[in-house]
Image (cartoon, rainbow, N blue to C red):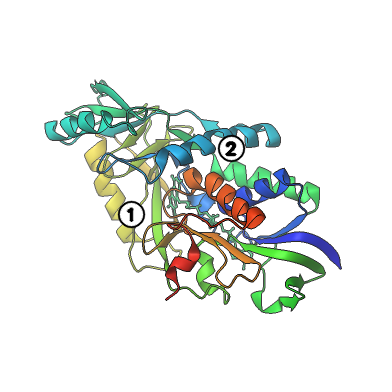
Amino acid sequence: MKKVDYIIVGLGIAGISVCEQLEARGKYFVVYDSGKNTATSVAGGVVNPVVLKRFNPAWKAESFYEKARPFYSVLERKLNVSLVSDIRVRRIFNSAEEQNDWFVAGDSPVLESFLSSEIIQNTNISIIAKHGMGEVLNSFRIDTDLLLKTYREYLERKGCLVSDEFEHSSIVTENGGFELNGYSANRIIFSEGAAVIRNPFFTMDCLIPKKGEYLFIRAPKLKCESILKGPFFMIPLKDDVYQVGATFAHGDFSFETSSEGKQKMLGAIAKMISCDFEVVDQIAGMRPTVKDRRPILGSIENNNMYFLNGLGTRGLLMAPLLSEWLFEHIDTGDPLPKEVEVQRFLN
Ligand SMILES: Cc1cc2nc3c(=O)[nH]c(=O)nc-3n(C[C@H](O)[C@H](O)[C@H](O)COP(=O)(O)OP(=O)(O)OC[C@H]3O[C@@H](n4cnc5c(N)ncnc54)[C@H](O)[C@@H]3O)c2cc1C
């Protein structure tokens, strides 16, 4: 029997953040990850602390941002890869009123460091933006595919990754700890993303998987180096390819791409650019969203089983600080912030 301090289930951005906390604390762990339907690999990778529909700060935007930026820089050095691009996000204004709302929002103390006070006039004939654009300062993009690939390789080299399905029914509880497939551990952390709804130990009816789709288009004449935000994001990749999305499909729990999703994105593209393009790919994934739009942290039954989930639409921004909160709670026994404590859903 191999003894570890923790078993982790799931290696998306939640699981990676958990591993980083454990390494910083010198703990031994093993990670189970099937690599199936990983939302983190589908994500556009945009880390943007502003709600660009209404020009509001995202919940606790500053605190999450302060942890996230250095977290990814540390990972870049550790994995010896380039993960972060300091790419600008430009919000296309639909009207003069929106320009005005942008200025008002930029005067607020939380948003002044994130919203540029200049209106950018559009000089690109392929972009439709007759009311100009506002620029989000300090946003960045993570290459999530590269992050997952290199982090998996890192764990494989350390000998602590099991690339397989974790069978919840195989857990044996022993003296407050757990045994499973030749491992014994004091604690388990479930960071399974939307798949947590199939976890028999997750007895809360609060997580709703929310499907999102992206369309990939090739538009050689667009020549845009910023992320555009119109009805959807349009993210420049390599070789004139742009990633457009993501949709929100309520009540659709399939992982297949849909013609409905494609039509929505084509409609949005027609509002954002005027040049020719061809569709080259379409992908779908499932966001782990929670009824009250806040993440889920902690233990349901105070039984050494913990959850880090509910990262919703901003997992890349929130996971680094959330994982820190979780381990401060585990290490000290201090309560978690009420807004994220999983037991808030207990009747
Ligand atoms: C279309 C789309 C676009 C998005 N764009 C952005 C964006 O631009 N910026 C942003 O910050 N966020 C974005 N998000 C949200 C972000 O992707 C999620 O918040 C985040 O990735 C969730 O991470 P996670 O680690 O909780 O789950 P996941 O990334 O889904 O990871 C969970 C992992 O657990 C594994 N797993 C589950 N159960 C088991 C089991 N029993 N055994 C073994 N392994 C298991 C899964 O295979 C998976 O690898 C987007 C999401 C979607 C769907």
What residue is pinned by disc 1?
Answer: 262
2 and 1 marks in contact (CB < 8 Å): no
- Mark 1 crowdedness (10 Å alpha carbons): few <14, some 14-19, many ≥20: many
Q: Position of residue 141 (x, y in %)?
A: 48, 36
Quarter of the image with the N terminus is: bottom right
Residue 31 appears anywhere in the view:
yes
- The image shows residue 36, relative to residue 221, as above or below, that is below
- The image shows residue 166, relative to residue 104, as above or below, that is below
Please tell me which residue is depicted at 46% across the width and 64% down the height of the picture: 255
Quarter of the image with the C terminus is: bottom left
What residue is pinned by disc 2?
Answer: 71
The answer to which of 304 and 293 lies nearer the viewer is 304
Q: Position of residue 238 (x, y in %)?
A: 49, 33
Please tell me which residue is depicted at 72% across the width and 46% down the height of the picture: 25
Please tell me which residue is depicted at 56% across the width and 50% down the height of the picture: 325
The answer to which of 285 and 326 lies nearer the viewer is 326
Q: Amino acid at mark 1?
A: Lys
Q: State which quadrant residue 228 falls in.
A: top left
- Mark 2 crowdedness (10 Å alpha carbons): few <14, some 14-19, many ≥20: some
Left or right of 202 in this view: 53: left
Q: State which quadrant residue 305 falls in.
A: bottom right
Q: Amino acid at mark 2?
A: Phe
Q: Is mark 1 within 8 Å of ligand 1?
A: no
